Amino acid sequence: MQIAEQVENDIIEGVLREDEQIPSTNELAAFYRINPATALKGVNRLVDDGIVAKRRGIGMFVTPGARARLIERRRADFAAEYLRPLIIEAEKLGIDIDELAALLRAERIQS
Amino acid sequence: MTAVIDQPFTRSEPRLRPAEIWRIVRLHAVNPTVFFGVPWIILGGAWAITMLISLIVSAGTGVSIVMGPGAGGAPEDIDGMRYSWAVLSPQWYLVVVGVQAIGLTFSFALGFGATRRDFWLGTSLMFVLVSIMYAAAIATLVQVEIATNGWGLGAHMFDALWYGQTNWFVDFYTTFALQLLVLFIGASVTTVYMRWRMRGMIVLMSTTAAIVIATVAVITWSNSWPAVFTWLGGLGIVGAFTVVLGFAALFGVLGYIVIRRATPR
Amino acid sequence: MTSTVVRARGLTKRYGAFTAVEAVDLTLEENRIYGLLGRNGAGKTTIMQLLTGQLFPNAGELEVFGREPAEHADVLRRMCYIAEAQRYPDDFKPSHVFRSAPWFFEHWDAAFAERLVEDFRLPVNRRIKKLSRGQLSAVGVIVGLASRAPLTFFDEPYLGLDAVARHIFYDRLLEDYAEHPRTVVLSTHLIDEVANLLEHVILIDQGRILFDRDAEELRGSATTIAGPRAAVEAFVADRPVIGREGLGGLASVTIDGRLDQAARVHAAELGLELAPVSLQQLIVHMTGTDLRADASEKEVAA
């Protein structure tokens, strides 16, 4: 479901604002060179999740509060998706938790 | 959700589909060089050579044309040219046209969604139309050649063999029959290849050879050759070419039967 | 609601002792894009020739638009199939092909065909015999797109096409399909590039259907697990393995199935690496048995 993730990213990054119309299924399909039916499935998942809603005869629009809900959900997954692999790899290399924290801080300054 | 709609299929297509047949004629004609261009180039080339030979021959024998009292009048008839086959020169090429109509155009037409039936009927119609045009042209050129006294050189290219003996209609009929036979032989033999491939061709060729040999043997052993020649002689030109036309029709029907289960290469 | 365009049951085509297509069951629904995938000689072209009435099956039932395709003008007029090795009439030029196409395809769009000719930079007045492989493919692609036939087959459509031309094909196909939905069957052995275009994948090998699945379901349906041999083997012990490779103490095993979050964490804790399997890799695993057998023999020999 890459399409759903792409649209979600656009919403989180503010490219797509709340109450703004998202591209049509065919536009998404053409842009990402994917099957329109696949794009439709992605959009339907966003509808099921309440991220976008259909306005009859016009198209799909980002729902109010969608961005906040997305961020909340991504935060919930953050530990499992990013932190645990990081900690496992760090342990493998003998980096303890304090050193890891220091590394993270140093990395943030660099970037 | 998916629903299989089992609509009872009503046959909405008529048995005879003029538009579907006509588009096959157009398909054969879309590249006009095949049926119209090359045969006329061959015929034109043969005519040019005939003219050249006539010029050489009349330059050798035709001193009287320039010097004699008849200068500017009718040139001497060049008799040997009555046996020239130049008028038939495009026929060999047209066998190839018949072969390619099936060997190449058939596969293409199937990809475009034509049925085998419509393809064969359309191809046959094309053959008939081409033969009519060609026969009319040859018969007319025979008359032109006679009227111009062999293009002013006493040449015989069209007024040769059996041509020019009677009238335009006989020349038309005989050319038409021969033309059709040539095209249908090329096409129908190729249908055998398209249906049974090389194995079919080997069987066809060996069967044909066996039949010819058997026929010759039977006639020879029964001492029937004089009777055969008498029969052929009795047919006359029109009768003989009616037999030719009959063979053309036979090949046409056989080709139709064979192509109905033929597959493209 | 969709309706069924093609229904085949036990479809079989034999050439003497060789069975090109064996007992194939197949259903194609209206207005979907299908991928008919498989190695060269798997039977893809034979299936398409059966479906378009060009070949006659030896056994089985076949209905296209509700009836047998062969010799039925009403069925055939709704299909377009330009074979990868299509034969053209002698001395034909692309211009002849495009001039005659509207006589056969009622939905032919001449303006679209012209635009495609420009896109592909196809020399329309050059003899087809003299075209390059890519230009020849372009002729078939243009006919397939511009014909807008309700059931369109593309047989290895991009052999010889360069990357730009292939992307033109994908873009035009998706654009035109969105505006004029129709059933499309794309046959190819080059899989990754088209994987995203497909809604449904039919994988064929040695004349049989290996699987017939929704493309979305297939994407990420398999996972490769790599790491120390013992750890990998322990991890995959009760999972369906479809591919196995090894080098010394390391192993790389591909399983059919998704891993849930807990399994992913567990794998990471074991020091295993997880990698998604592309459709192409998945198909290589499923149709490349002979190759793998060879490879393991060499390993044993070495």
Image: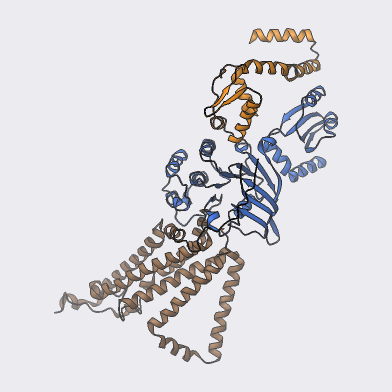
Single out the residue that lies furthest toward the left: B69
Quadrant of residue A28 within the rendered picture: top right
Locate residue C198, reporting x and y percent: 61, 39
Residue B230 visible at all: yes
- Residue A18 higher or lower than B260, as above or below: above
Locate residue B163, reporting x and y percent: 33, 78
User: Which residue is more in the foreground, B122 or B186?
Assistant: B122
Numbered-mark total: 0
- Residue A93 higher or lower than C43, as above or below: above
Instruction: Identify the residue at image location x=46%, y=58%.
Output: B20
Instruction: Identify the residue at image location x=61%, y=20%.
Output: A9
Residue B96 visible at all: no
Instruction: Identify the residue at image location x=62%, y=59%.
Output: C56
Left or right: B90 as drawn, with respect to C289: left
- Please state, as top left, top right, bottom left or bottom right, where the N terminus of chain B lies in the image: top right
Instruction: Identify the residue at image location x=51%, y=91%.
Output: B224
- Could you say which chain is coloured brown in the image? B
- Residue B187 higher or lower than C138, as above or below: below
Locate residue C275, reporting x and y percent: 73, 29
- Please state, as top left, top right, bottom left or bottom right, where the C terminus of chain B lies in the image: bottom right
- Could you say which chain is coloured blue in the image? C
- Tell me what hue chain A is rendered in: orange
Quadrant of residue B222 within the rendered picture: bottom right
User: Which residue is more in the foreground, C281 or C154?
Assistant: C154
